[in-house]
Amino acid sequence: MTGLRIFLWFILAIVIISIVWRLLSQRINIPCPAWLYWLVELDNPFARACHAKVIIENLNLASGMKVLDAGAGSGRVTIPLAEILGEQGQVTAMDIQKSMLDVIQKKTQIKNLHNIRLLQAGIGNGVLEQNYYDRVILVTVLGEIPNQHAAFEELYNTLKSGGILSVSEMIFDPHFQSKKTVINEAKAVGFREKKFVGNWFAYTIQFEK
């Protein structure tokens, strides 16, 4: 019974944190606090379209590709991406929080990965190379960005011609963005809608440059 109580208290704590985080997010654009990284480490069973494996499988990766994980957080998608691309490819883990990048760095050391580049910066601040990446992924981070238009513009410019931007959103995230919002923002800077996976409350949508 003690074990059950601990589990129930754990679930209650997660629910309370999620509610407070969602309420705060309605007032200000704030990234997931680094000390809560464990909350986003696991794939949500009710949001398959946002699972790391599904996101990666739909990227149609090839040897030697350069991929940007924009708003990488603790590297839930970064690490498996780097493992699949291998030494011939490169993954850039971009995040505004150094503490999140520190978590990724520890993971790369444990797994002995040498194809991950860490970049501390905000999306839309104009720090990304132009026509550099083959793929860009944006996983449950769009709602944390103050200037979404500037973010989409920079991501468009950093992709090579024919490159793919993959955007994943799920209702369980406090900063959830609707499919309509994402499509409108992407098309406003020149992206063409290419592929949709999932449903209205948990989806991954791809755009082509």
Image (tube, grey):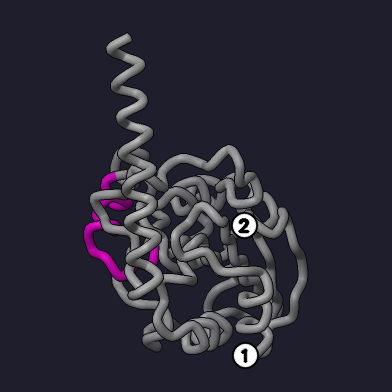
Q: Residue at x 30, y 70 (%)?
A: 96
Locate residue 24 relative to residue 165 in the image: left or right: left
Q: CA distance from mark 2 to mark 1?
A: 28 Å
The x and y percentages for residue 157 are 55, 87
* Residue type, mark 1 in image: Val
Q: Is residue 96 magenta?
A: yes
First in sequence, mark 2 or 1: give its number: 2
Locate residue 113 relative to residue 184 in the image: left or right: left
Q: Is residue 69 visible?
A: no
Q: Is residue 99 magenta?
A: yes
Vertically, is 103 above or below 196?
above
Local crowd at mark 2 within 10 Å, few (<14), some, or many (≥20)? few
The residue that mark 1 highlights is 189
The x and y percentages for residue 164 are 65, 71
Query: What residue range appears in magenta?
Result: 93-106
The x and y percentages for residue 171 are 56, 56
Q: Is residue 141 visible?
A: yes
Q: Residue at x 62, y 69 (%)?
A: 178
Residue 59: give its label. none
Q: Nearer the viewer, mark 2 or mark 1?
A: 1
The residue that mark 2 highlights is 63
* Residue type, mark 2 in image: Ser
Q: Residue at x 58, y 61 (%)?
A: 168
Q: Residue at x 65, y 50 (%)?
A: 49
